[in-house]
Image (tube, helix red, strand yellow):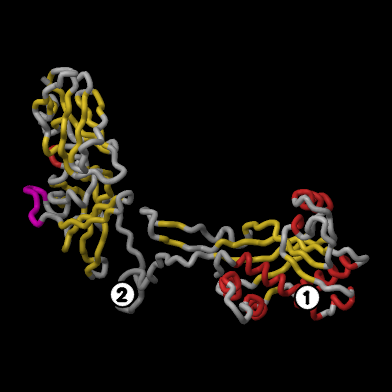
Amino acid sequence: MSTALAIAGVTAVLRDLLADGLAARNVAGVLGASVGVSVLAPDRVVAANAAEASQLNLFLYLATPNPGWRNAALPSLDGSGRARLTDPPLALDLHYLLSAYSGGDLHAEVLLGHAMQLLHETPVLSRAAVRAALTPPPGPGNALADALAEAGLAEQIELVKITPAVQNAEEMSKLWTATQSHLRPSAAYTVSVVLIQARAPARSALPVLTRGPRDAAGRETGIAVQPGLAAAVPLLATAEPPDGQPVAGIGDLVVLRGQALDGADRRVLLANDAWEVALELPAEPEQLPGHPAATTVAFSLAGQEAALPVGIYRVSLLVTRPDVLDQPRRLQSNRLALAVAPRLTDLPQTVARGGDGAATVTLAFAPALRSGQHATLVLGSAEIAPLAAGATPGSLSFRIAGAEPGTHLARLRVDGIESPIVNMDFTPGEAPRFLPRTVTIT
């Protein structure tokens, strides 16, 4: 495959092909004037108030997707958006306008005839011709020439082909009008195909070794389908923070429930793409009373203040279990969402108002704020923005203008995720109640 420089490489090869062909046919001697080949836009070929020299101009006016390659695939990434899974090429057809310029009688016709014959006799650019045209000339280094030589045009899987294209008078008129230049004897060509591919590494699947266990004769039995609701691989159903809360906090013991969760070396993976977190935590060595290892696994968030900022995480289980051939295999379960909320570690019980009737509440919390995170104090039903002065990642001050005396429920909201305020640990029939997380303003 080629790099993005392949488009310029094709133009350079065609220019070299035309220039060498005109020289080999002694066209300059026939015309009695020097002959050149340019690759400019038509409005830039002849300078203002300058005499028109005898020359060919090759203008790339359009690049379109190749219809034969466009359905191959599109580049794709994994769920995190970081690892490249496939790397198919960008396949392009290049559309050129070949024009002849000259101030002499019949010179333009002679140039166009020789050029069209050259392209007719060279319908395919050979790899040797591409390499020869793109080889940098000896002498001081030329950065562009060196780059074109490394474009990989000669090594791409398909050879580059030159095909005449038919343009009627209306299409040709629109093209010359768009370039704001005067019409010259011209011919259109389509050059196909240029395959541009990024050289970034992609993930490649391993080959399949077997389609199932082998019988006594050594034949593969194939895939055995056994209907049933029991999971054959680890399957998570719920991720449950303690006390029935919908969010977890630093220091909590989180319980995962599902099927086929037992095995060796059980570890829990927490991932968050926004904060580039991929943290493995060991499962608790002891099982919860009355809950077998096949259906439950617990892990602790204790001591993870620095590793886990407030946010939504994907949680999955890594476990080693025997496969269909009774060989140990490392398996990963499906992923569930788990919200990590801020936890108030120092909530003042009483705050006195100042002489202006304002009160300032200072909160300490965990985990600390990361750059780009936004925090808000919700006191009762009022939202208060933090003060910038004296703020630290783990502590913020909030000034409440015209604070109303009384006791108010307090919760900290970070990027839309609030610290728990409702006691969810109640028996059926019992009314829910608020947690005692209040601030009294006097």
- For the point 84% across and 58% down, the residue is 184
According to the picture, the residue beneath numbered tag 1 turns out to be 121
- First in residue order: circle 2 vs circle 1: 1
The residues bearing labels 2 and 1 have C-alpha atoms spaced at a distance of 62 Å
Prevalent SS, magenta region: loop
* Residue lying farthest to the right in this orientation: 105
Task: Tell me which corner region of the image, top left, top right, bottom left or bottom right, holds residue 220.
Answer: bottom left
Can you tell which of label 2 and label 1 is closer to the viewer? 1
Instruction: For residue 378, say whether it is visible.
Output: yes
According to the picture, the residue beneath numbered tag 2 turns out to be 215
The magenta span reads 285-291
Q: Position of residue 384 (x, y in %)?
A: 25, 28
Q: Nearer the viewer, residue 159 or 98?
A: 98
- For the point 21% across and 30% down, the residue is 398
Question: What is the crowding at mark 2: few (fewer than 14 residues within 10 Å), some, or many (at least 20)?
Answer: few
Q: What residue type is disc 2 on?
A: Asp
Q: Quadrant of the C terminus?
A: top left
Question: What is the crowding at mark 1: few (fewer than 14 residues within 10 Å), some, or many (at least 20)?
Answer: few
* 419 is higher (above) or lower (below) than 289: above
On screen, residue 192 versus residue 415, left or right, reads right
* 269 is higher (above) or lower (below) than 105: above
Q: Nearer the viewer, residue 62 or 157?
A: 62
Q: What residue type is disc 1 on?
A: Glu
Q: Secondary structure at mark 1?
A: helix
Q: Quadrant of the N terminus?
A: bottom right
Q: Position of residue 89 (x, y in %)?
A: 54, 63
